Amino acid sequence: MIMRMSTLFVRTLRDDPNDAEVQSHRFLVRAGYIRRAAPGIYSWLPLGLKVLRRVEAIIREEMDAIGAQELSFPALLPREPYEATNRWTEYGDGIFRLQDRKGADYLLGPTHEEMFTLVVKDLYSSYKDLPLSIYQVQTKYRDEARPRAGLLRGREFIMKDSYSFDVDDAGLDASYQKHRDAYIRIFDRLGFDYVIVKATSGAMGGSRSEEFLARSAVGEDTYVRCTHCDYAANVEAVEVRAPQPVAFDDAPQAHAEATPATPTIDTLVDHLNEAFPRADRPWAAGDTLKNVLVMLKHPDGTREPLAIGLPGDREVDQKRLEGQLEPIEVEPMDEAELARHPALVKGYIGPGVLGEKSASEIRYLVDPRVVEGTRWVTGADVEGSHVLDLVAGRDFTPDGTIEAAEVRDGDACPSCDEGTLETARGIEMGHVFQLGRKYADALDLRVLDPHGKLVTVTMGSYGVGVSRAVAAIAEDTLDDVGLCWPRNVAPADVHLVAAGKEDALYATAEEIARELDAAGVRVLYDDRRGKTSPGVKFKDAELIGIPTIVVVGKGFADGTIEVKDRRTGEREDVATSAVVDHLVALVRS
Ligand code: ATP
Ligand code: MG
C-alpha cells in the first residue's frame, strides 16, 4: 500500500505545541504522529501508529524467540486481587480507581502481576508445567504526579510486560537471564544507545533488578558508572560503602559551644574556623552533621516525621530517599508540624532530641558514613549553639542507616577500590526484576514438586515501555529540522517527493512509487498538486523523518532523480531508469 500525502490523515504544523518540554514531543506533534487528548494522554495518528506497530513487532519477535507466549489481560480490573497484595492501598494516588453501577470497585491496571499470578494459579498445579513465561503488550494507566515530555511519561501508555514462573531459584535465574538477553537484542534492534544498570528492588529486597536506560540528557533517571570497573547503577540503587568504625578511646569529651547566628552549614563552618581553628586543617562542611526533617506520607494517608542525619557537605536526594521508602511518599516538614515538636530548634537540631528514645520521639536514620567512632559538629538543640566532638556510638545512637544522601561525581566506587563514580542521565526503557515469591505468597500460587510437596512458585517481572520507546528513539535521532527515524522503525522506507508542475513528472513519480511498492519497499509519496510548493514538500519530508528522501524534480528533464539520506544529508543523482533497483538495494542493505 502506497501512502499518499494527498490523502494521508496528517497535517504538519509549523508551530510547536505550547506544552512541549522536549524536542521529540514537539516534532511528534508537529509532524502529525500523535495528538494530545488530555495531560499525559495521547492519540496515535496513522504515521505514529506505524512506528508504534514496528516497535511492538520487534519486541514480540524477541519475546517469542525465548519461548514467551503472548496473551492479553483487560485494562479494567477488579479490586480484590490488588487488595490481596495490598497494592490497592500502596499505589495511593498513583492509580485510577472507579466504580461500576453497583458500586463495586475497579481500577485501570498500572501493571499486572496479580492477574498473571492468578491465571497461572487457575490453570497450573504441577512443577511439570513450569517454567513458564507469558507476556502482553497492553495499555497501562498510572495517575503520574508529573506527566511529562509527551509519550515519555504518560498517564496512559503502552507497556510490554512479561512474567516468569519457576519452581526454584535456579529456574528463576535462568528465566531472568533469558529475558535480559532478549532485552539486549530488542534494544540493539531498536537502535538505542543504552546502559544496563543495577536498580533498587524496593520493598521486596534482595533479589536481582536491572534497568535498561537510554542515555539521554532529557532523562529523569540519574545513573552512575565506575571509572575503573564495570559497576553501573541507578543512583537510587547506589549503596555507599560504609567506612570501618574508628577507635574513639582518645576522643575528647563532647562540648557545647556558643556559635551565634550559625543556622546554616556555611555560617557554621566560617564561625568554627574563626573561633575554634583546627591545628591540622581548616574546618569543612563535611565535618558537620546536618539533620534534615521530613514527613513521611504512608499509602493509607497517615503521616510520620523522620530525621535524616548526613554529612553537612551533602544534600538529601529526594529520589534516593523515596526509592528507599517506597511506597511511602516524602514531603518537607512544614512549620505547623515543627511547632508540634518543641524540642526541635530550627537550625540547631542535634541527635540529642532525635531517635525513638528521645524527647521528640522522631525516628532518626543516618547516612552510612556516620559509623561508630566518627566525630561531628552538630546542633546542640539550643539557639546559637553547637556541640563539637560528638562521637557516633558514644554520644548518640541512631535508629538505623538510610541511603538518602546525594551521590556525586568523584565518589568512591562501592564495588572496587580504584575507581570513582561518574554520573549521567538516562530514560528508563526497560526493567528486569526478580520478584521472588512476594506475589505467589500473597495470592497462594503453589504447585506440587517432584516429591508431591506443595511449593510456592517464584516469579520474575520484565517490562518495556513501548510508547516511551517511540519517543526515546525520536529524541535520540532527531536533528534541528525534524525527526530522523532509524530504518528499523520508520513509518516508511522512502519518502518520494514529486516537485514540479508537469504531468509527465507526476506520471514518472507514480510509476516509481508503484514499482517500489511491488518490490516490497514501503513508500510515502508526496503527490500533492496545486498550491503545495516544492519548498513545503521538502520541509514536510524533513520533519516527518523517513530515512530516504527521493526527489523527482529539477533533474527530471535530464533523466535523473535525487536520492537523499535524511540523516547524513548526502545526496546523489541516480538515472531515472535505475532508481527503483537502486532504492530496493538501499532499503534491503
Ligand atoms: P519510572 O521510574 O520511569 O516511573 P517505573 O519504574 O515505574 O518507571 P515499571 O513499573 O518498571 O516503571 O514499568 C516498566 C516500563 O514501563 C518502564 O521501564 C518504562 O519504560 C515504562 N513506563 C513506566 N511508566 C511509564 C509512563 N508513565 N509512561 C510511559 N512509559 C512508562
Ligand atoms: Mg522500573
Image (spheres, helix red, strand yellow):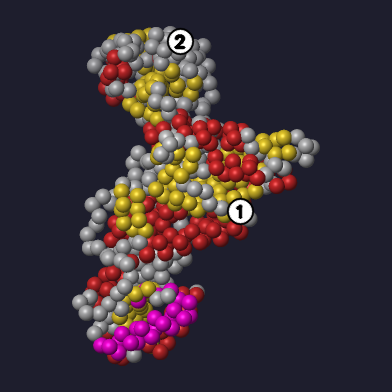
At x 22% / y 79%, what residue is drawn?
530
Q: Position of residue 210 (x, y in %)?
A: 53, 44
Q: Residue under circle 2?
A: 357
Q: Residue under circle 1?
A: 68
Q: Position of residue 195 (x, y in %)?
A: 49, 50
Q: In the current view of this chain or complex, which residue is farthest to the right?
A: 451
Q: Position of residue 137 (x, y in %)?
A: 50, 53
Q: Earlier in the sequence, mark 1 or mark 2?
A: 1
Q: In the current view of this chain or complex, which residue is farthest to the left?
A: 531
Q: State yes or no: residue 524 in magenta.
A: yes
User: Rounded to the nearest whole Å, what is the CA distance between mark 1 and mark 2?
Assistant: 53 Å
Which quarter of the image is occupied by the N terminus? bottom left
Amino acid under disc 1 = Ala
Q: Nearer the viewer, mark 1 or mark 2?
A: 1
Q: Is mark 2 within 8 Å of ligand 1?
A: no
Amino acid under disc 2 = Lys
User: What range of the chain is rendered magenta?
Assistant: 502-525
Q: In the current view of this chain or complex, which residue is farthest to the front?
A: 102
Q: Position of residue 448 (x, y in %)?
A: 73, 38
